[in-house]
Image (tube, coloured by chain):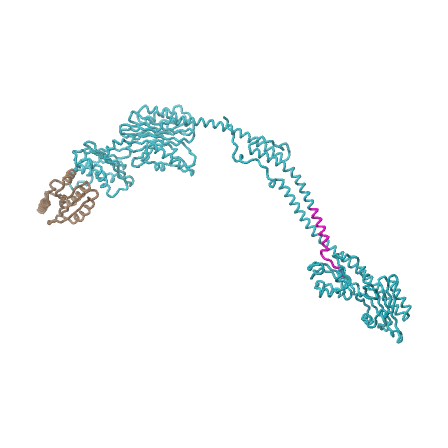
Amino acid sequence: MVAQPRKPAALRRRAPRKVGWRHSLRTRLVLLSTVSSLLLMAALALVFYLAMRGLLVETARSDMRSLAQQTTRGLEAALGSVQVSAETLGANAAGIGREPMGLRVLLMSAIASDPDIVGAMLIIEPGRLSPDDPGFSWYVRRSGEGTVESTVPDLGYDYRVMPWYIRTTTADRPWWSEPDTGAATGGATYITYNLPLRRPAQDGLPGAAIGMVRVDVPVSRLSALLGDVPADSELQLVLLSPERAIVLHPDPALRGKTTLPQVVNEGGRSDLAPLLQALQAGQAIEFEHVTASARGGEPAGEKRYTLGYPVSDTGWAFALTASNRYVLSQLRQITLWGVLAGLVVALAGMALVRRTSRLIAQPIEDLTESAQHLALGESDFPLQHVKRVDEVGVMARAFDSARSSIKQQLEEIAAMGAARMKMEREFNIARDIQLAMLPSGTEFDAGDAKVELHGMLQPAKAVGGDFYNFFERDGDAVWFVIGDVSDKGVPAALFMTRTMTVLEVAAQLGGSPGRALHEAAKHLVAGNETCMFATVLCGVLELRTGALSLASAGHEAPVLLRADGRREFLPVPSEEPLGVAVADSYPVWRGRMLPGDTLFTYTDGITEAFDRGNEAFGTQRLLEALDPKLGAKAQCKRVVDSANSFAGDAAQSDDITVFALRFTRDVRSHERFTVRAYLRAPLPPNAVGLLIDEVDAGLAGHGLPATLMHDVHLILEEVTCNVFSHGQVRGRDPALELLVSVGGQKLCLEFRDDGLAFNPLSQPAPNLEADIGERPIGGLGVHLVRELAEEVAYSRDDHHNVLRVLLHITHREPNA
Amino acid sequence: MSLTIESAPLANGNQRLALTGRLDTHSYGELDRQLAPLLASGIQSLVLDLAGLEYISSAGVRSIFKARKALSAHGGKVVVVNPQPQIQKVFDVVKAVTLEEIFPTIEEADAYLDAMQRKVLQGDPDDD
């Protein structure tokens, strides 16, 4: 079976997906270029508009000025020529005197000479030339191709009372009349130029008035001069009479019906006041103003530009006014066209960019598609553009080479994975074999003694270098070993099997654990080129006595867990590990296991189990994990579970091995110890009394005589006081265990304490014969004990002082 | 059961102490405390009435030793009256009291002490 390379999970998740048009490079390119060109165009249009506007306003005003000046000059020429004709007529008439025919000819020629003049009137008042002169009045008027003539009185009024006659004859200069419409002029609106007839001047004074000359000019002649301006044009041409009547105006509502002062004062057009003032002063004016009130179709607040020119000294005036709208209407049109043209260009540009962007975006889109297929594991998807010489080509070739590299590496990974799986399978088999070499838990009996053994191994790798082993020897001893080979994995596993075999053979030779280690060391050093080594703890437990002997080759100190919960690391002397060198000897530590005690051994995988914070499980946690109530198997499981839960999810760094051995005695033999009592710090106030009570209660059913009990009490007190007064270690009270057993005619008191080594029996007996003044006061207690007991023996056993006191039971009291 | 101590001076300047209960490592201190003023007051001799004493350990023996030492400095004596057998056994083992210092009654002990005192007053240099 060949393992398939697995695709990375993150890449398998998605199906290939096109980049959405909203996110595509092409859309961005088109949008960006279009928006930027539009912005550019808008800025250009704005600049253009502002420049054009200034230019156009200037040009338009200049045009208006030319038009106004030209029109004014035309009016001046027309009115001037009428004035000249009238003055010529007046001068000639004054020279001719009263010659009716001559005067009529003059009138006719005045009409004939000037097409602007449609009528001419001559009045010589009766009695002015001479007292009896009948006077003369004649009026000639064009009518069609011919003329109409009549006397003035025939026109239907008495000229002498007419205001215009009185004004003309009394004024010191000729004047133009306001427009009028009369039957004499055939219903047409006309204006007149009035000139007095005077006697010749005498002595520099003007001669007295004898009559007047009047010529008629139709308003239509003037309006023709103003040119042909459409009524709806924004340009307004206005002709003002000497009295500032509005003679000509595009608006029929104003034309001939009102005056400029009326418009200014009553029409609410205060904005035209500057025009009125300037014209009254006979000055030309050009000004910009805002209409103060609405009129006709013109809204209030409109900006206008107005020019006013007086027509020389005739009193007439010409005004030209235009709204800014008029000035700018052209500009608006030009701008509108400009913007439209700009939009068209922009659209064309967009289409162009869209088309050209394809050239750039398409190769990138192709590469993107190939990349998406590669992400799906299709490393053979066709790749385009590799032949291009531009950046796209470089990218495509780089992508192609990366793709080939990935493909090759994936194949290598697959091959490696397959090889690894094969190796893992082999490792698993090796692990099964290795674990099968380790004995499972068991129990051995010897008489009433029993030992329960159990080991657990939790390798860090598939195979490891830790081991343990045990077997019964000679029917009443258990031989056991626990070891840790340096390093882990296959080399350690191989060395471990060799070490186990060598140790087993060495143990069969008999003798102490120290000798077994020595023999094993000699064998393992031979041919150990790789310098592998193993730390080993080897021990033997004598089941009948509980005697324990241990030897260590560089291994961790085991823990002795007492039945009452006390626990300590045993100070087993340690020599060099097996495999590197052979120590001269491996010293043996000797001690005794009592019923209920557990010997707990382990490898450094337990104490050096690290948690995530890199803190080791350590010896203190190991001691705390132990529970004296548990059997060997439960004890092992408890410690391993503690170490595992301490390490949490941190990776196990080393093999973890534990091996426990629990020593017990059969329930049937428990009567050996009638009383088992303890005294430990802190001592209660009446400690000895309590101990005595406990012993009394335990021995109550044995029918022991009172004298013996008295001796027992004395011995208890004396020994106990001795232990606590001499046994303190660094200020700490020792712990005392008392075992009282009754067997046959013997009562045995066994005192075990972990205080300072002290043999009370080594003290010299007190000199009881000395005089009272010289006798020492102390030393009596031990003497008493010795005297009262049948036998007293001291031994130092596994850091404990053991004092055995044997008493003889003389008789029993049946009713006790 | 603990120790009870009754004290009563005797007519001839001797002091009588009656001990009842247990004289052991817990109670000897109390005896030492009560003896201290007596021994300091310069009494001639001490009569210990042990009829009620049920138990004695080496600690108790030491207290009696101390009293003996203190009195013997000026020729005084400690005598024991009527000890129970088990007390007698302990005294025998450690030779706490000589046989001639043990009496069956107070009166006999008092008489013995009087005789001793007279001997001293007469200047008998036999025992110092």
Name the quadrant containing residue A24. Answer: top right
Does the magenta run of residues contain A676?
no
Asked if one can make out residue A769 in the rendered structure from this viewpoint, the answer is no
According to the colouring, which chain is brown?
Answer: B
Q: Residue A575's spot in the image, x, y percent?
A: 35, 30
- Given residues A113 and A661, the one toward you in this image is A113
| Image height of A306 relative to A627, above or below | below
- In the image, is residue A147 above or below residue A793? below
As drawn, B84 above or below A381: below
Q: Is residue A124 left or right of residue A647?
A: right
Quarter the C terminus of chain A occupies: top left
Q: Please provide percent x and percent y for residue A557.
A: 34, 33
Residue A129 on image: x %, y %: 88, 73
The quarter holding residue A149 reads bottom right
Foreground residue among A440 and A650 = A440
Residue range of the region highlighted in magenta in the rendering: A317-342
Magenta span main SS: helix
Q: Describe residue A445's horizontal placement relative to residue A437 as left or right.
A: left
Residue A331, magenta (yes or no)? yes
Nearest the eye: B87 or A56: A56
The answer to whether any part of residue A613 appears in the image is yes
Most extreme residue toward the bottom, as rendered?
A: A131
User: In percent of the image, x 20 and y 40: which residue is there?
Assistant: A778
**Depth check, front residue: A531 or A801:** A801
- Colour representing chain A: cyan
Which of the 4 quarters of the picture holds residue A112?
Answer: bottom right
Q: Where is residue A654 in the image (x, y as percent from the top left)?
A: 41, 32
